[in-house]
Image (cartoon, rainbow, N blue to C red):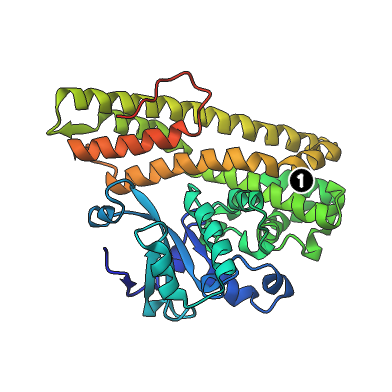
Amino acid sequence: MANPHLRNLGNLRPTASTTRVLDLALVAEKFGDTDEFRSRPFFRTEALNHSIILKHTLRHNERNIFKGMRLTATKVLFPFDPGDLRLGGQYVFIDEPDFQKRLTAKIGVVDSSNLAADLDVLAVVDALPSFDPFLMRERLRQIGREPARCYFDVSLADMAKMQSFVTSQIAQLVELAFKSEGAGAATLSERLALKLMTDETAQSLEPLRATLRLSGDEYREGVFAWKGFLYYKWSIQEWGERLPELSRSILSARVINIGREELAAVNSARQIVIKLMGSTMRRINAALSKYDEAFRALQEGRPAAFRSFLLKAPEMFLDLGEAVGVIKHLDTFWRFRFPPGRLPLMEGPEATEIFEDFRITVSGLSQQEAISTQPL
């Protein structure tokens, strides 16, 4: 197997993507003294609550760990010092051979019932296409786990990127809720966008809460759902325009050293992938259009429609989050494996492996499509 030690992790946090990095060690550092954190931990095992979990694209030498059956894996990293990631750490891949034995060696002897419960959570985390906090929260709820709210924030790196987008999205609402600000509404929008993404309970957001006509838990749940849709809209804006380029790159990829029948199967698989990517994006856009419609109602002075939408919205995060995560996964993997600006070139076995993985991934989202999706 690959060397289970990582040396310098110092650049991990400043650039960490919400979808790729679940930094439980940072959450413990920031919220470890709060009652909510202590009463509703992510895992029951303390060592796991100080880990960093990563969605990792497997290198060629690492694929042997999974006998070539996976292109990506979920890595559980145990930093030597959570406060100084430059010192590195040790890791284990979820579901690698002897995973439970290797994990136990890292975390020490624990109560068997706690370990069993944590393995269930790790299985959910591993199955997710990304660590999108809105999807992850709903998936964990399905197995009866509801960790503290502090585990489901957007990463600092993504938050900085989202700032201007969220500001523009809520500008009209701020004008509605803070009419007395006049010319200062633009600056206020910037400040409140940051508050909305980092601390929805802030007193400065009270006029927004009043406009939404929500209070207590309903307000916290409603704003969390609102942030989810803002996150999805921003995320799609970030990579959505690249999809036509991704489709062209997939279709034009050159495959060498492959037999005629195998090439026909590869070509069939990539056609299926492109068609299902298109239908999945239509589903994503249809879901987001429902949000846009509800938000327009709020802007028009009909807050009840928006309030009702927000309170039901988490149910949509399962399908929406899965779809967004899968499409982004395909885009991220393809750009990692084939950097833009050059014609993708691969050997027959690799092409078969990649397109079979892509086909299975998107087919799971589009069962309603009347498309043949027989394995290669």
Residue found at the very far left of the displayed protein: 257
Return the x and y of residue 3 as percentages of the image width and height: 27, 69
In the image, 60 versus 140, the foreground residue is 140
- Quadrant of the rendered image containing residue 199: bottom right
Quadrant of the snapshot with the N terminus = bottom left
User: What is the x, y in percent for residue 129?
Assistant: 48, 47
In terms of image quadrants, where is residue 335? top left
Instruction: Tell me if residue 60 comes above or below residue 236 in the rendering.
Output: below
- Residue 95 higher or lower than 367, as above or below: below
Residue under numbered circle 1: 173
In what quadrant of the picture does the C terminus appear? top left
* Left-right relation of 348 to 236: left
Please state which of residues 37 and 346 is positioned toward the viewer in this rendering.
Answer: 37
**Residue found at x 68% / y 62%:** 149
Q: Residue at x 20, y 27 (%)?
A: 262
Residue 40 on image: x %, y %: 68, 67
Label 1 crowd (10 A; few <14 / some 14-19 / many >=20): many
Query: x%, y% of residue 142?
Result: 65, 48
Query: Quick one: 298 or 317, which is closer to the camera?
Result: 317
Left or right of 130: which side holds 231?
A: right
Q: Residue at x 31, y 23 (%)?
A: 268
Residue 211 is left or right of residue 353, and the answer is right
Q: Residue at x 42, y 80 (%)?
A: 80
Residue 233 visible in this rendered orientation of the protein = no
Find numbered disc 1 in the image and state the secondary structure of the residue it sits on: helix
Quarter-of-image position of residue 150: bottom right
